[in-house]
Image (spheres, rainbow, N blue to C red):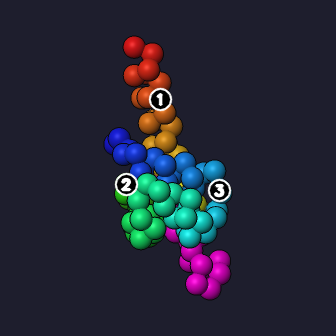
Amino acid sequence: MKLDKIDKRILEKVVELAECQAAVIAKDLAGLRTKTVIRGWINLPDPPGAGNPDRDKGRWKVFVTITPYGLELLRRDCRSNEEVGSS
């Protein structure tokens, strides 16, 4: 599966900010899409299984972590971009 631009940026931000609140990610990436769209991705990641919203850490707060599957998608995307750049 190939990540689109917004999926990749969200996953990169989740890695960069490690277990941060979904609201922080949505605010940081608001220039790419609306906060509502980004929050929707966090609640139902596309591709499915790439991110993990955790609602158990605090009341009214959603924290996000990347799954092993999401990390693998990022690695594959980086490798494919390197291959395209080297040709």
Q: Quadrant of residue 57?
A: bottom right
The one of 23 and 30 positioned closer to us in this rendering: 30
**In which quadrant will I find the N terminus?**
top left
The spot of residue 62 in percent (x, y) is 57, 74
Name the residue carrying label 1: 79
Residue 24 seen in the figure: yes
User: For numbered disc 3, what is the local secondary structure?
Assistant: helix
Say if 4 sits above or below 14 in the image: above
Residue 69 seen in the figure: no
The spot of residue 56 in percent (x, y) is 60, 79
Question: Disc 1 to disc 2, how far (Cα)?
Answer: 18 Å
The spot of residue 55 in percent (x, y) is 56, 77
Q: Quadrant of residue 64?
A: bottom right
Are the two marked residues, 1 and 3, in contact with CB atoms closer than 8 angstroms? no
Question: Disc 1 to disc 3, how far (Cα)?
Answer: 22 Å
In the rendered structure, the answer to whether residue 46 lies left or right of residue 50 reads: left
**Residue stretch in magenta:** 50-63
Question: Disc 2 to disc 3, how far (Cα)?
Answer: 20 Å
